[in-house]
Image: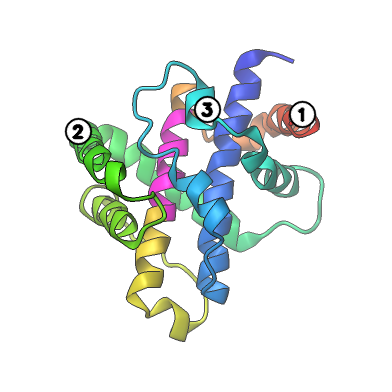
Amino acid sequence: MDKQRQEKAMAFAGILNALSLVQKIARTGEMDIEATEACLSSIPVTNPDSISDVYPDKSVLENGYKLTLQQLGDSDSKDIEITRYLVAVLSLERKLAKSGNTSQLGERIGQLDRQLIHFKITDEQIIRSLASIYVDLVSVLGPRIMVAGKPDIIKQTSTQERIRAYLLAATRSAVLWRQLGGKRRELVFQRRKLVEAAKYNLQNI
């Protein structure tokens, strides 16, 4: 299995994994602390030497690989909601790349290092900071991603902040996917290669 294809599948799984957390919290209001920590921890790694620096624990991508197989494989149980979020995140990432905001984004994320000395990445203060970065530098590029869920859950400020933090993580993985050569047209014309790489990675966790 080609190493670059393996790494692209990892980054793509990172996107879908973050989006699945968006979906879960919007529907249930529950935040899986372990999954959230693994997801959000990819954000501060802005200058990795390798993809392993971004996703040090490969097992956290298991759900993302399974979603890759579900969304791009021959399954009839594709999740239209996840597909909608994916298309929106990839669109925002392209706008971010063209906007000139990437250096400012790096600076804002770099400022988190001081906070992370004192707080875990799942602490409400850090999540609030991540949400603010997403609103100021990513979401503003529009259009806004309309998240579906239970209205009484989504209207809560804490839920909104967590959703935005997850979307920032999804955007971070989308940036990495593009840097590794990922292109949206591959999801239509070369999706089998991505599915094969996801299967390989899933079997070798």
Using the image as rendered, state which of residue 160 and residue 118 is in the foreground. 118
**Residue shown at 63%/30% (left/top)?**
9
Q: Which residue is mark 3?
A: 182
Residue stretch in magenta: 166-176
Please say if 99 is above or below 165.
Answer: above
Res. 116 image quadrant: top left
Give the camera-side residue of 10 and 205: 205
Sequence-earlier tag: 2 or 3: 2
Q: CA distance from mark 2 to mark 1?
A: 35 Å
Q: Which residue is mark 2?
A: 100
Q: Mark 1: few, some, or many residues within 10 Å (few <14, many ≥20)? A: some
Q: Which residue is mark 1?
A: 196
Quadrant location of the N terminus? top right
Q: Nearer the viewer, residue 91 or 160?
A: 160
Q: Residue at x 52, y 75 (%)?
A: 149
Dot 2 falls on a residue whose secondary structure is loop
Examine the rendered structure and indicate whether residue 50 appears above or below residue 159: above
